[in-house]
Image (cartoon, rainbow, N blue to C red):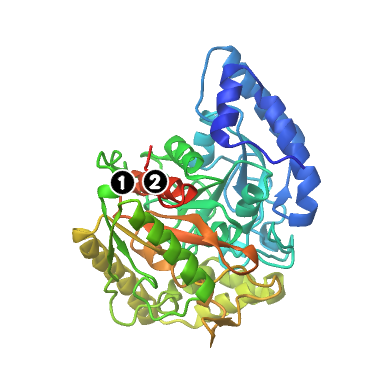
Amino acid sequence: MTPCLRAAAIAGAVRAGRTSARAETEAALARIAAGNPALNAFVTVDEARSLAEAEAVDRRLAAGERPPLAGVPVAVKDTIWVAGRRVTQGSRLFADFHAPADAIAVERLRAAGAVVVGMANSSEFACKGVTTNPLFGPTRHPRDPSLTPGGSSGGPSVAVAGGLVPLALGTDAGGSSRRPPAHVGAVGFKPSFGAIPYGPGFPEPFTGIAVMAPIAADVADAALMFEALCGPDPRDPDAMAVAAADARPPESLTVAYSPRFGLDAPVDADVRDAVDRAVEALERAGTRIVRRDPPWPAGVTETALMPLQHAGLATLYGDAFRRDPALFDPDIAAQIERGLTLTGAEVAAAQLLGVEVSRVLAAFFADADLLIGPTTPCVAWPLDRLGPETIGGQAVPPRAHAVFTPLFNHAKVPALSLPCGTGRSGLPVGLQVVAPRGLDRRVLRFAAFIETVLANGGQGQAG
């Protein structure tokens, strides 16, 4: 199997006439046919529909258009509406659902000349930290099929890291498109809430924080995709414009480094060491690094915020659960059952805590331009477990691997994960870059600077 080119290279070649959208789509479909059986990244592929979409792009090019993602094959998470395609949310409840319309983000992908080549696997309702579901089973890590890529955007992340497609569109309501990219060695970008319009589509269990998230092999491609998708739309009342790129040199920014993001959470030594080496490389390149932790509100943990997801699931699917609990992934069923027992006061307490998280982080950025730290506290773990049994030598609950991402969803800020080295067995480690809400382009520009520095052993400068 020949890995695909980067999205920017494909689009440039298609616009220049050196290849065509149809040829690139055929190549992607061939890679999927060869590589997907071992990975289970894609769950639905409609070759005829994809080729017809590619031919439509070629006609646009013949008419003189030069779209920025011309002919670029894209995977879309199997929770996002793509008109006419089967979209299941990994749930038996939606096994035969075909989307009546495109999500705005998909509509913008098409306008930019991209071609959807298939739907990529997700945990049921995107509410689980590994990628498996009752319809399609597990997605496997591209470097070791005995391991999980994490979740819930494991399918899109593996589609990119496995070389099947250059770009994927995921969702992120608690780290779903940052942790899997971190585990498989891809770039996952959670934009500010509202930066990419949401819907139309399925209702979100975790309302008010979920975003559409570009996943790519490098930061440049993630930025290219983001620029095609961002900007207000009247159909989404939360959609907003983001700030222009920061003109200051990246190394002149004040960057707060927090090894545990101010949380009482264990980190494996191999992850700690990889992140420390990346930070040291940034310091050698002249970056202004300060050691500083966000002062989170008392009692803040992912567990304290999870009633919002559980209540959302219970509201959306509680009736179906009461009729037949066996329809659901047992782990999702347990969340629904928990949601059905919550009181209004418990849900309100979680909502208020989320608001306080947002306020605290906004104040933290008053004297820091960026915040960096590990995306996850561990590398990938065995496929048959919800999480590693120990982290940092301590016994941990199943969601301990997810501790460093959810608070940034509640704060509604942009956060990006990019590869920063490897841990044990050569498994990828991710570095997370965070900025104030609306400063998405600052995150992307600084992440590109990090890529350059790490590629040059800590001596390079941003271009």
The answer to which of marks 2 and 1 sits earlier in the sequence is 1
> Horizontal and vertical percent for residue 264?
39, 81
Q: Which residue is mark 2?
A: 449
Say whether residue 155 is left or right of residue 415: right
Q: Is residue 413 visible?
A: no
Mark 1 and mark 2 in contact (Cβ < 8 Å)?
A: yes
Q: Say which residue appears at 33% left-offset and 78% top-offset.
A: 349
Q: Is residue 7 shown above or below 270? A: above
The quadrant in which residue 319 appears is bottom right
Front residue of 413 and 208: 413
Q: Is residue 320 shown above or below 21? A: below
> Horizontal and vertical percent for residue 4?
67, 38
- Which amino acid is tagged 2? Phe
- Which amino acid is tagged 1? Pro
Q: Quadrant of the N terminus?
A: top right
Q: Say which residue appears at 56% left-offset and 20% top-offset.
A: 15
Q: Say which residue appears at 80% left-offset and 53% top-offset.
A: 37
> Horizontal and vertical percent for residue 435?
32, 55
The quadrant in which residue 226 appears is top left
> Horizontal and vertical percent for residue 428?
58, 61
| Residue sitting at the far top | 63
Q: Which residue is mark 1?
A: 250
Front residue of 408 and 110: 408
How many discs mark residues in the rendered view?
A: 2
Q: Quadrant of the C terminus?
A: top left
Callout 2 secondary element: helix
State the separation of the CA atoms marked 2 and 1. 7 Å
Q: Say which residue appears at 30% left-offset and 48% top-offset.
A: 251
Callout 1 secondary element: helix
Say whether residue 249 is left or right of residue 14: left
Q: Is residue 188 visible?
A: yes
